[in-house]
Amino acid sequence: MENIKLNDQIAFLRRQKGLTQEELARALGVTNQAVSKWESFQCCPDIALLPDIAKLFDVSIDELIGYKSADTFENVYLKIKSLFTQSPAESVFENAFRLSVLLHEAACTQGYKGYAPWDTNKNYGMEEYPHKWGFSACSEPEGNTIYSGNGIFIANGKSYQTPDISQIRDLYLALERLADKNVLRVLYTLYEMTVNNFDLYVSLPDIASKCNLSETDVTTALENIPITIKESENEEPLYRIEGSYTDISLMVFKEQSQMILTA
């Protein structure tokens, strides 16, 4: 198990330092093939090389091989990676969300340069229902973070890319289709009815009843929503949001949708 940590650490720390396998090999006086074998878990470096590797990556030998924890980004990153590797598949998204709650808190408080004090004695991500949060956001030159209900959005300002003309056109058309009250009501109703079961499709009457609209209005709205359709055994059309769009506009329209659905 410790060997696996060592191999994983070497590969990760090399990438974090911006070194190629060839550059690492030259720095340690070994062959490119040796580094490749380390990182592909075929073998481990000679024990005599560990001090040089640790020095190169600015970590202790114990930290390098996983015997001792270190409060560094690299160490925390690898621990999180290990957590998700060993956790049941069904817990992945819940764990990711709980960690994101902590990241949002950190970004907000430190992002505001201390204006918003961080109550480090409270661990909201550890609560039974971490999504029971209203709305909070932080916008700084370095980035942005938004937390609303069960959604968290974090953006790195340094990696922002202005959309090209084609992307702007696609965005305009998408927003134009969604700029209708009935479309949004049907969108969020359909999401609510199917989000917990990716095999579930629902009928037109069920959608209409759920969002309190006529079937005619729902049919018109569905023409502006990315959906997939299949027929039931009695040839009745059934609907759900298209897979790649399952979470469409959850963050963008989170607050507005609450007002629309309760209107």
Image (cartoon, helix red, strand yellow):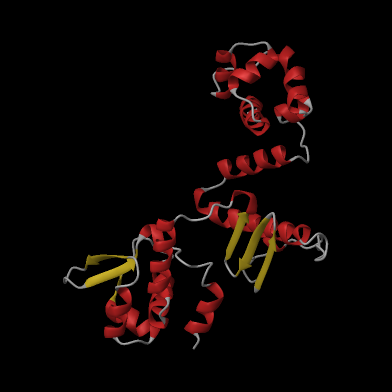
Q: Is any atom of residue 174 visible in this view?
A: yes
Residue 92 horizontal side relative to residue 25, left or right: left
Q: Give the residue displayed 57% in from the left and 67% down from the top.
A: 150
Residue 167 horizontal side relative to residue 226, left or right: right
Q: Give the residue displayed 54% in from the left and 67% down from the top.
A: 251
Residue 155 horizontal side relative to residue 166, left or right: right
Which percent across, then down, holds residue 189? 41, 76
Which percent across, then down, holds residue 123? 74, 61
**Residue occupying the far left of the picture:** 234
How many marks the image carries: the answer is 0
Q: In which quarter of the image is residue 191?
A: bottom left
Residue 108 horizontal side relative to residue 100, left or right: right
Q: Between 115 and 2, which is closer to the camera in this rendering? A: 115
Which percent across, then down, holds residue 85? 56, 41
Q: Is any atom of residue 91 visible in this view?
A: no
Q: Give the residue displayed 65% in from the left and 74% down from the top.
A: 134
On the rendered image, what quadrant is the N terminus found in?
top right
Q: Give the residue displayed 69% in from the left and 15% down from the top.
A: 28
Q: Between 44 and 173, which is closer to the camera in this rendering? A: 173
Which percent across, then down, holds residue 94? 57, 57
Q: Quadrant of residue 120?
A: bottom right
